[in-house]
Image (tube, helix red, strand yellow):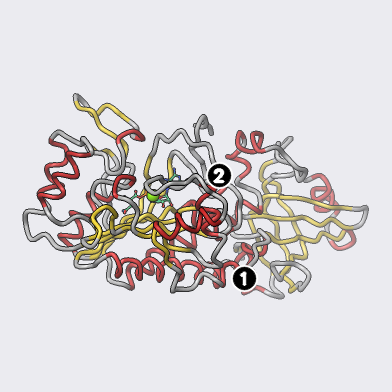
Amino acid sequence: MKTTINQVKDYVGKDVTIGAWLANKRSSGKIAFLQLRDGTGFIQGVVVKAEVAEETFATAKRLTQESSVFVTGTIVEDTRSPFGFEMQVKEITLIHESVDFPITPKEHGTEFLMDHRHLWLRSKRQHAVMQIRNEIIRATYQFFNDEGFLKIDPPILTGAAAEGTTELFHTQYFDEEAYLSQSGQLYMEAAAMAFGKVFSFGPTFRAEKSKTRRHLIEFWMIEPEMAFVDHEESLHVQENYVSYLAQSVLSNCKLALNTLGRDLTKLENIKAPFPRITYDEAIELLKEKGFTDIEWGEDFGAPHETAIAETYDKPVFITHYPKDIKAFYMKPDPARPEVVLCADLIAPEGYGEIIGGSQRIDDLALLTERYQEHQLSGDAYNWYLQLRQYGSVPHSGFGLGLERTVAWFSGVEHVRETIPFPRLLNRLYP
Ligand code: 4AD
Ligand code: MG
């Protein structure tokens, strides 16, 4: 019977065949321990010289790292293995012999690993991170479907900037100029007016000259948009969503979290409600913490965010930023028009801003004014402004950065390990 490593629990005491690669090996004159990997998991194959054909043992001894094989043997329970099972090997068929696999079990430098990302992905650690990424994606669809959101796919080639015009990737679109999407939000607002509650999930592109542990040039964003929902109600959706993601990863990725040595108490803490402070309070807090020269009206950098986050054991919302440091579409607070109804969700442990969100301006005149102030002239936004002409309603939305969330839940330092093929400043290969 042919099966995969994640299914062997159904075959205890039985013989099965698994297609796998050799991740690692130990052997002596009498016994060989094969660490086998098939993409669904890792299992140890034990080959005892006295119990197999001579050539099977010879093959086991000769196997090189990343050679591909079909192995046949009996599945037994093994409490010492993190996976709980091992295989008593009876037969090995070599499919392809791998020669000089560059990533050995020893330590390698980051640049070397990044140059070999196509092979680095085969490691146990990368497997664990990708499983957590996959769980967050799965749980995202589950959460929003359960909450009655419709999944909408905004375009990637666009004629208008959503966030800021400086970070756009330009491309030729026949005779016109086009940009790669930096956010699907404007289209999601149109979708919310059509379908009420919607969410998107797709790649976004930002030509940011930032070389930090939190910045990718290409990253994936989840962008819910909700009609008839105000800023406050949107914060509830955000904290419930993030809590749901954390609890899903805790329940369904135990082995992966273990492999990564993640401190589970950090994830157990991620439970709604999350603390909230206003931008004004954040400025005061920063001053108390020694950032004496920060002034009202300045945006926060990574050290500021980290200092604020350290004050709490949960993610924290910073709300009501000055309008001048936020996007043109954010709705001013009616009680205080110099600030907007927005929030950034800051993760603990230095992972930074996970979510940016706001209530949107629903008044046509005000939106037009703000958009002109931002010098976003031209016809590209006409359709967006028109949304306020036909039954405009209060609405809010937010964007969660997938890779930053994966880094945070996994406990990996840098977002480059959270996406299969990271696009970074000066890196387009492999
Ligand atoms: O705060 P941002 O720029 O918000 C928007 O794009 C809104 N239009 C979203 C919306 O309201 N629909 O980006 C949202 C999130 C950030 O909080 C961060 O998690 C992630 O996207 N992000 C990045 N992740 C990795 N690399 C980058 N360069 C990122 N820029 C933003
Ligand atoms: Mg932001």
Question: Which residue type does callout 1 highlight?
Answer: Thr
Label placed on residue 265: 1
Front in this rendered view, residue 169 or 326: 326
Front in this rendered view, residue 89 or 37: 37
Residue in the image at 13% along x and 47% along y: 385
The image quarter containing residue 319 is: bottom left
Name the residue beneath numbered marker 2. Answer: 213
In the picture, measured across the screen, residue 170 lies left or right of residue 254, that is: left
Question: Which residue type does callout 2 highlight?
Answer: Arg
Q: Does the residue labelled 1 lie within 8 Å of ligand 1?
A: no
Coordinates of residue 137 in the picture (x, y in percent):
44, 60
Residue in the image at 84% along x and 52% along y: 26
Question: Alpha carbon of mark 2 to alpha carbon of mark 1: how far?
Answer: 23 Å
Label placed on residue 285: none
Q: In which quarter of the image is the N terminus?
A: bottom right
Give above or below for 408 relative to 423: below
Q: Is mark 2 on a helix, strand or loop?
A: loop
Coordinates of residue 242 in the picture (x, y in percent):
44, 66
Front in this rendered view, residue 270 or 78: 270
